[in-house]
């Protein structure tokens, strides 16, 4: 068995350890006085920037209706097949609305394709990252959970208008 | 044969063909909106403009006759420029509401805008506005803004449906489609205009907004509305039939089907009246039992009668396979009384498609039963006079043979039925088996002209699996798991009649050992001379014309 020669042997100072310990302690001490980046979640909440892709939500207009016209493009483009849309007719001018709109959050991979494809700017990625459920059924979000008033989403919509 | 040169290649064509037809036969698709192979030429959309050598200007391919030695260029710069210009022109006033339009996904304008358009509009003015959501007829909605004024719907009503019900009114960019004041677009074939409308201007009220076309699977099948046997495609999503559309078959229905067939021959498949599983009526109360128990009960109850006391009633609504298995069972019991019920409505027929015989397979049952067939009238009289005490009927309602049987059938000693949906027969039956509908099984029908045509399962029953049973699958079917709600469509607990019959025969000596509809058909091909040499592959997608019957039908026509 050949004896493997070390690439670099420790010199005398290093062998003494103490200078090395001092070096390490200095680094630690230096960092103690730098600003903190760790957050005390959940006491402290992270407020993501507009470019953040949290759970997809539906935009709710001021007149209480959703923007979505149930075209089904998001459902078609979704690589994870997370979205199910059932259209129906409405008396409103836009003719068509989603009678049922469900996103299976267990399937969703937060890719944002749905947002990108939507012709109506009706589905956008929110800043919501807190998704908790205890069973499969709860993970299916219906319109009740998906609809979010447009004011709360303005940030993202502006971002999309500037950068999409 | 004369020759034409298209895009540098020589092709033969038939004298009298137009350029677009010659190109189509050669496999070259020249874009077109208003031209339709089954309608007269109108030449108003101009998108089929092509360059022909030695002609001073571009010509429209749909109405220019092909000539020997003609050199056509469908891809030259001049042609493409013209095509872009036409597309831009058509799109000027088009609302581009694809997101809310049912046609999206099968829209010619959408496809051509993608293939042949430059993708940008120079039109900055406000688009023209017209009426949307106009009820043109009881089954049709019209959207004026989407209409590109190709006149296909007008020509269809005039030439195919033979009812002059539609017309253009106004001029220029205000032109629109309407019916005569006070009239409604209500001929028996209106929904075909939805299929041929190149855009989504005409939509079917029944199908409106039900599903995106790309979410459905499509299965080639046959309409069961009458003995014409129009070739259809069944659109299914989440194991539920959402629409039927005609499929081209030159020999049967060209490209059309009637509104009745389109709307009324599938709703029973997914309905509350379906019979699920097997039932036995024990001392006045109906109980759900296992399939085996019901089969056993059926066999031994029938065995307890003299064969002259039994009658078997086949069905022109069931397939050849069902009826063949049924005949074999009748023979094993030595039953002589076997017939089927006709469903003729002499007032409901026309010279276009609709036939007076409202079943898809009466000619087929005639061929299967052959000389074994006795008269239905004798059986009805037998029931009334109590000479016949036991009846086994498949997929039909006894009462439809004779209204006055209503009373008599409740007094029968034994009434066994396979049935898809509840009827007066199943209400009074002692043993009922839930039968698969035409959309849930393989099989064959023979239409009134003697054309053997195949049906295929489009909807899965409980013991079927889409992938294993080689059924058509949409993307959703392919990737759905048992945890996805959209993959949990209702599956009914039903079996094809031939299978139920085979299972009943298991308890006797002459067992019918059929596992697949195809096996039965192969046996039919061996035993019944008219079907000699046929199998499912020979029948294929467009059916097979039985020769002898063809001559006969020609002689009587
Ligand atoms: S793409 Fe937009 S408009 Fe279409 S169904 Fe999805 S959310 Fe609705
Ligand atoms: S973010 Fe991506 S995975 Fe999630 S619903 Fe939208 S398209 Fe589907
Ligand atoms: S309604 Fe459709 S078929 Fe009729 S003219 Fe308009 S675009 Fe053509
Ligand atoms: S003509 Fe007969 S077979 Fe054809 S669609 Fe109508 S009912 Fe069905």
Image (cartoon, grey):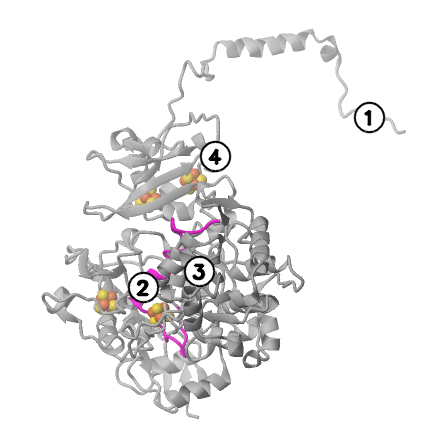
Any mark on residue B117, and which?
Answer: 2
**Do the numbered discs 2 and 1 sit on residues whose CB atoms are within 8 Å?**
no
Q: Could you tell whether B245 is left or right of A66 in the image?
A: right
| Real-space Cα separation, disc 2 to disc 4, in angstroms | 40 Å
Which corner quadrant of the image does residue B9 belong to? bottom left
Q: Is residue B85 magenta?
A: no
Q: Could you tell whether B100 is left or right of B313 in the image?
A: left
| Real-space Cα separation, disc 2 to disc 1, in angstroms | 71 Å
Quarter of the image with the N terminus of chain A is top right
Q: Is residue B250 magenta?
A: yes
Q: Which residue is mark 3?
A: B218
Any mark on residue A106, and which?
Answer: 4
What secondary structure characterizes most of the magenta part?
A: loop
Instruction: Kindly report which numbered mark, 4 or 3, lies closer to the viewer in this rendering.
Output: 3
Front residue of B548 and A111? B548
Q: Which residue is mark 1?
A: A5
**Where residue A57 appears, x then y in whole percent?**
35, 34
| Real-space Cα separation, disc 3 to disc 2, in angstroms | 30 Å
Local SS, label 3: strand
| Residue density around tag 1, few if under 14, some if 14–19, many if 20 or more, within 10 Å | few
Q: Are marks 2 and 1 on the same chain?
A: no
Local SS, label 1: loop
Q: Chain of mark 4?
A: A
Local SS, label 4: loop
* Label 4 vs 1, first from the N-terminus: 1
**Where residue B344 appears, x then y in whole percent?**
34, 72
Q: Chain of mark 2?
A: B
Q: Is residue B223 above or below residue B36?
A: above
Q: Is residue B142 above or below residue A27?
A: below
């Amino acid at each position: 068995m050949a004896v493997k020669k070390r690439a670099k042997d420790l010199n005398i100072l290093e062998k003494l350890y103490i200078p090395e310990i001092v070096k390490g302690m200095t680094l630690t001490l230096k960092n103690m006085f730098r600003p903190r980046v760790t957050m005390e979640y959940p006491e402290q909440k992270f407020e993501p920037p507009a470019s953040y892709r949290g759970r997809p939500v539906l935009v709710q207009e001021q007149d209480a209706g959703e923007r979505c016209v149930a075209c089904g493009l998001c459902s078609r483009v979704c690589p994870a097949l997370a979205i199910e849309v059932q259209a129906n007719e409405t008396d409103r001018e836009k003719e068509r609305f989603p009678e049922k709109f469900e996103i299976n959050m267990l399937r969703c991979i937060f890719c944002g394709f749905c947002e990108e494809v939507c012709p109506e700017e009706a589905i956008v990625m929110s800043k919501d990252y807190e998704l908790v459920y205890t069973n499969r059924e709860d993970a299916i979000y219906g319109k009740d959970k998906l609809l979010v008033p447009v004011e709360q989403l303005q940030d993202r919509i502006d971002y999309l208008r500037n950068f999409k | 044969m004369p020759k034409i040169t298209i895009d540098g290649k020589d092709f033969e064509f038939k004298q009298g063909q137009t350029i677009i037809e010659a190109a189509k036969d050669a496999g070259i698709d020249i874009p077109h909106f208003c031209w339709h192979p089954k309608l007269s030429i109108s030449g108003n959309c101009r998108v089929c403009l092509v360059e022909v050598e030695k002609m001073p200007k571009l010509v429209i391919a749909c109405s220019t006759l092909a000539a020997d030695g003609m050199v056509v260029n469908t891809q030259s710069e001049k042609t493409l420029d013209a095509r872009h210009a036409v597309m831009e022109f058509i799109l000027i006033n088009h609302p581009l509401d694809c997101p809310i339009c049912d046609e999206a996904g099968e829209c010619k304008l959408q496809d051509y805008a993608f293939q042949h358009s430059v993708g940008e509009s120079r039109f900055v003015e406000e688009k023209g506005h017209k009426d949307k959501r106009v009820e043109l007829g009881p089954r049709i909605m019209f959207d004026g803004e989407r209409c590109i004024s190709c006149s296909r719907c007008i020509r269809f009503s005039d030439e195919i449906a033979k009812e002059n019900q539609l017309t253009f009114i106004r001029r220029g960019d205000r032109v629109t489609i309407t019916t005569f004041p006070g009239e409604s677009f209500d001929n028996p074939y209106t929904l075909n205009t939805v299929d041929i409308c190149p855009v989504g201007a005409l939509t079917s009220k029944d199908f409106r907004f039900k599903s995106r076309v790309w979410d459905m699977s499509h299965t080639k099948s046959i309409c069961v509305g009458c003995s014409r046997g129009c070739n259809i495609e069944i659109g299914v999503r989440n194991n539920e039939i959402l629409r039927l559309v005609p499929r081209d078959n030159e020999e049967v229905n060209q490209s059309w089907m009637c509104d009745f067939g389109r709307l009324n021959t599938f709703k029973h498949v997914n309905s509350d009246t379906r019979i699920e599983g097997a039932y036995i009526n024990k001392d006045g109360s109906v109980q759900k039992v296992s399939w085996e128990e019901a089969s056993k009960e059926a066999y031994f109850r029938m065995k307890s009668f003299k064969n002259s006391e039994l009658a078997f009633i086949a069905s022109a609504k069931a397939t050849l396979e069902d009826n063949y298995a049924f005949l074999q069972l009748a023979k094993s019991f030595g039953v002589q009384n076997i017939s089927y019920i006709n469903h003729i409505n002499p007032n409901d027929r026309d010279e276009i498609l609709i036939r007076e015989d409202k079943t898809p397979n009466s000619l087929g049952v005639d061929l299967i039963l052959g000389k074994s067939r006795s008269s239905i009238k004798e059986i009805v009289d037998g029931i009334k006079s109590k000479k016949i005490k036991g009846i086994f009927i498949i997929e039909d309602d006894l009462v439809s043979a004779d209204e006055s049987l209503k009373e008599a059938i409740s007094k029968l000693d034994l009434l066994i039925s396979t049935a898809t949906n509840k009827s007066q027969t199943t209400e009074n039956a002692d043993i009922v088996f839930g039968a698969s509908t035409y959309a849930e099984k393989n099989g064959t029908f023979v239409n009134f002209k003697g054309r053997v045509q195949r049906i295929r399962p489009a909807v899965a029953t409980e013991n079927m699996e889409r992938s294993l049973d080689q059924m058509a699958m949409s993307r959703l079917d392919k990737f759905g798991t048992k945890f996805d709600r959209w993959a949990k469509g209702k599956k009914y607990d039903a079996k094809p009649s031939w299978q139920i019959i085979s299972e009943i025969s298991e308890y006797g000596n002459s067992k019918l050992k059929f596992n697949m509809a195809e096996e039965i058909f192969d046996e039919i091909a061996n035993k019944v001379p008219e079907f000699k040499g046929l199998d499912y592959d020979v029948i294929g997608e467009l059916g097979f014309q039985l020769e002898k019957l063809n001559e006969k039908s020609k002689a009587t026509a």
